[in-house]
Image (spheres, rainbow, N blue to C red):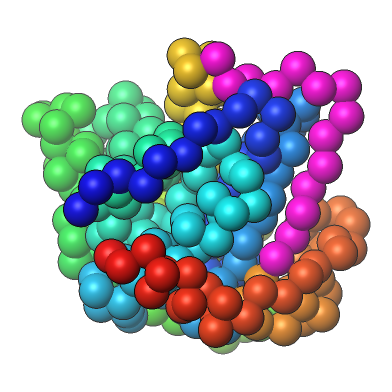
Amino acid sequence: MAKILQMPTQTGKIGVFDSGVGGLTVLREIMAHLPAESLLYFGDTARVPYGDRTQAELLRFVREIITWMQGQGVKMVVMACNTSSALALEIVQAEFDLPILGIILPGARAAAKAGRRIGVISTVATAQSNAYKQAILEASSNSQVWQVGCPDFVPLIEKSRIDDPYTRAVATDYLKPLMAANIDTLVYGCTHYPHLAPLMNQILPSSITVINPASFLVTAMTKELDLLGLRSNQSKSQIDFYVSGDPAQFAQVSSQWLGFTPDVKPVSLAVLEGLAIAQSF
């Protein structure tokens, strides 16, 4: 497969995508640390959650989204989704001629520096891929890693059920094997999970260091933008929001984390699927 040619420009937007509202945790970090950058956020809410998808399905979704983002003139793509990063990142990096960053490597390296007994909570697909475990052990061969797939978290977060007693019960159950292993570090292996931080703080001992990979991804982004001469020096920036599902629902759910109600536009699955077909992957 030949690379799809794209000439990124300094004034282009940074494309950020996730299956739903999870990637907003990454978006907030970018907004805070790269305020001059204009952003394009895409939530694939018509196909959320990604955690129980096959690699073939995820690769198709990612190709569709990146192809669409290229048409919007983005200069960089950020996969604000651990599952996509685990199963599709290296493939699409070889197919598209623009910088594409995933979230796993920055998070794994940060975890390896923080502790030696490391727990990772993620979607089932990310856990089964062993992507975090491999990346952590490459950074620190003396580390021990325990992984727990948490299939209920994303649907509960997407439905704004974070304060539901059921969510607390589910979280307590998921964390039991990690607590039994006496972990000293916990990695949020899904970009949705930082939304659970208030709940996690109630359950976890204060001695456990929590790693939010989004913070370290933004550091990697900044270095890449500077290296490629693509960092924006605009005095004004803007953020555009798009979803494949219901824009109103996404706007309502996301407003509690953004601090404002975004203007969200729809992108039909037919459009996305048609673009990928035209590229003949």
Residue 101: give x, y in percent of width and height.
42, 39
- The stretch drawn in magenta includes residue 235: yes
Tag count: 0
Relative horizontal placement of residue 38, taking residue 181 as reference (left or right): right
Q: Position of residue 274 (x, y in %)?
A: 48, 77
**Which quarter of the figure has residue 231?**
top right
In the picture, measured across the screen, residue 40 lies left or right of residue 67, that is right
Q: Which residue ends up furthest to the left in the rendered image?
A: 141
Q: Start and end of the magenta stretch?
A: 229-242
- When the figure is inspected, residue 188 is found, relative to residue 273, above or below; the finding is above
On the image, which quarter does residue 35 sit in?
top right
Label the magenta part by its dominant secondary structure.
loop
Q: Is residue 260 above or below residue 166?
A: above
Query: Foreground: 85 or 166?
Result: 85
Between 242 and 250, which is closer to the camera in this rendering?
A: 242
Q: Residue at x 50, y 45 (%)?
A: 78
Picture residue at 53% right of the left edge, 22% below the top:
225
The reply to whether residue 250 is visible in this rendering is: yes
- Towards the viewer: 161 or 22: 22
- Residue 243: where, in percent of width, then height? 66, 71
